[in-house]
Amino acid sequence: MPHPHLSSAQSSILVVVDIQEPFAKAMADRAALVKNTTTLIHVAKAAGLPTIVTEQNPEKLGPTVPEIKKSLQDVGAYAPLPKMAFSCCAADGFVKRVYDTGRDTLVITGMEGHVCVQQTTLEALNLGYKVHVVQDAVTSRRREDYAAAIEKMRHAGAIITTTEMAAYEWLGTAGTPEFKAAMQWLKW
């Protein structure tokens, strides 16, 4: 039986939280956020994970950034859930989408780490889900807010992970068709 702190392809869902323009331009690590989230989207597809994407107040903040939107479209996962609440769990239909997958682990990327990502993480934990926060695919405008959010989520019970940790946990083994499909996104 796998360790409970591992994220498996069979039990996980990738959640892409509110990575939108022009808001993303103000983020401390926009380039890393986009690169790592794009990698996770493609590896999730190769490993068989569903992906849920949210957009915070899209009429004011705009759509998902073009690079991530294209990756989501490429894998057939661009069906954004618009929301006004900061927590995805408070958005109409989010918890149902998660529940309908039959999976119990949310792997979260997005922004801002100390607002929507943190509130989603805490509420998902409260609902009984396991949560892995991908720290190199989460950002905030201010590094202090980001650091405090990561610490708070860890103390609340979230597993803090990285893009490569999550990707290789989903793949589990080398030599499979899933591994071969994902390698173009994980090359050194």
Image (spheres, grey):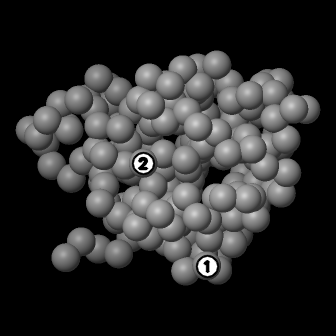
What's the residue type where badge 2 is placed?
Answer: Pro
Is residue 78 toward the left or the right of residue 171 in the image? Answer: right
Which quadrant of the view contains residue 96? Answer: bottom right
Q: Within 10 angstroms of label 2, few (less than 14), some, or many (20 or more) residues?
A: some
Whether residue 91 appears in this view of the structure is: yes
Q: Residue at x 66, y 58 (%)?
A: 93
Residue 12 is situated, as x and y percent measured from the top left of the image, at: 40, 59
- Quarter of the figure with residue 18: top right
Q: Which residue is mark 2?
A: 50
User: Residue lying farthest right?
Assistant: 60
Apparent side of residue 17 relative to residue 107 in the rendered image (left or right): right
How far is the residue under mark 2 from the one under mark 1? 19 Å
Q: Position of residue 87 (x, y in %)?
A: 75, 60
Tell me the quadrant of the picture where the C terminus can be found: top left
Which of the labelled discs sits on residue 90, or is there none?
Answer: none
2 or 1: tag closer to the N-terminus: 2
Along the viewing direction, whichever of 122 and 5 lies nearer the viewer: 122
Instruction: Please report the residue visible at 35 percent of the width from the left and 64 percent of the height from the top.
Output: 11
- 73 versus 175 height, above or below: above
In percent of width and height, residue 37 lies at: 53, 36
Direction from residue 90 to residue 100 in the image, left or right: left
Q: Which residue is mark 1?
A: 127
**Looking at the image, which is closer to me, 12 or 163?**
12
Which residue appears at 55% of the width and 80% of the height?
Answer: 128
Picture quadrant where residue 126 is located: bottom right
Question: Judging from the image, what secondary structure is the residue with disc 2 in?
Answer: loop
